[in-house]
Amino acid sequence: MSLIIKEDPSEYPLCPDGLHGAVIVDAVDLGKQESPWGAKHKLSLVFETQLQDEEGNPYILAKRYTWSLHEKSSLRKDLERLLGKKFTSDELLAGVDLEELIDRSCQILVVHNETEDRTYANIESILPYKSASGQVVKNAIKSSGNYQRVIERPDYKTPEEFASNGV
């Protein structure tokens, strides 16, 4: 008896590359994930763009990070760029509440990365959203309200359950 699995040929709309206005709609604790360097605690920030696909839905993109605020970590660099300031040692000791970033406006630089099979839209950089006068505006962009946060979904799995499934 054969057990054949195939890639789902359905295509998701590809967010155009370039700099786009967006709003942070979720921060997801992914728990421990296997990596080439062993198990690492991961998280994902989820963004909804102002751009819409052909069906009128905003593009949803996510960027995955290692759970670390080390000075060389991608998360810390992106957060400092987004907030427009370096973290103080007191702020780092107190910790950063990623939930407070939800509904924050920003700009994301989307780049296309191609593989043999497909093209991916990835977030290269996250920047603060600025008005025409150059002032940072935290809530300039509103989400569509269509995105349901991961922790609010009926099939929500705790980070431990999610990680144990090897996803």
Image (spheres, grey):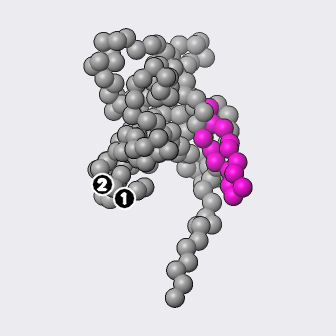
Front position in the image: 33 or 92: 33
Q: Is residue 22 magenta?
A: no
Q: Judging from the image, what secondary structure is the residue with disc 1 in?
A: loop
Q: Which residue is mark 1?
A: 165
Residue 44, quarter of the rendered image: top left
Front position in the image: 25 or 9: 9
- Residue 116: give x, y in percent of width and height: 72, 55
Q: Main secondary structure of the magenta part?
A: strand
Q: Residues within 10 Å of mark 2 (few under 14, many from 20)?
A: few
What amino acid type should be assigned to the residue bearing mark 1?
Asn
Q: Judging from the image, what secondary structure is the residue with disc 2 in?
A: helix
* Quadrant including the C terminus: bottom left
- Residue 3: give x, y in percent of width and height: 52, 80
Q: Is residue 70 visible?
A: yes
- Residue 36: give x, y in percent of width and height: 50, 44
Front position in the image: 109 or 44: 44
What's the magenta region? 109-122
At 29% across and 18% down in the image, what residue appears? 93
Query: Distance between the Cα atoms at labels 1 and 2?
Result: 6 Å
Circles 1 and 2, Cβ within 8 Å, touching? The answer is: yes
Residue 102, quarter of the rendered image: top left
Q: Which residue is mark 2?
A: 161
What amino acid type should be assigned to the residue bearing mark 2?
Glu
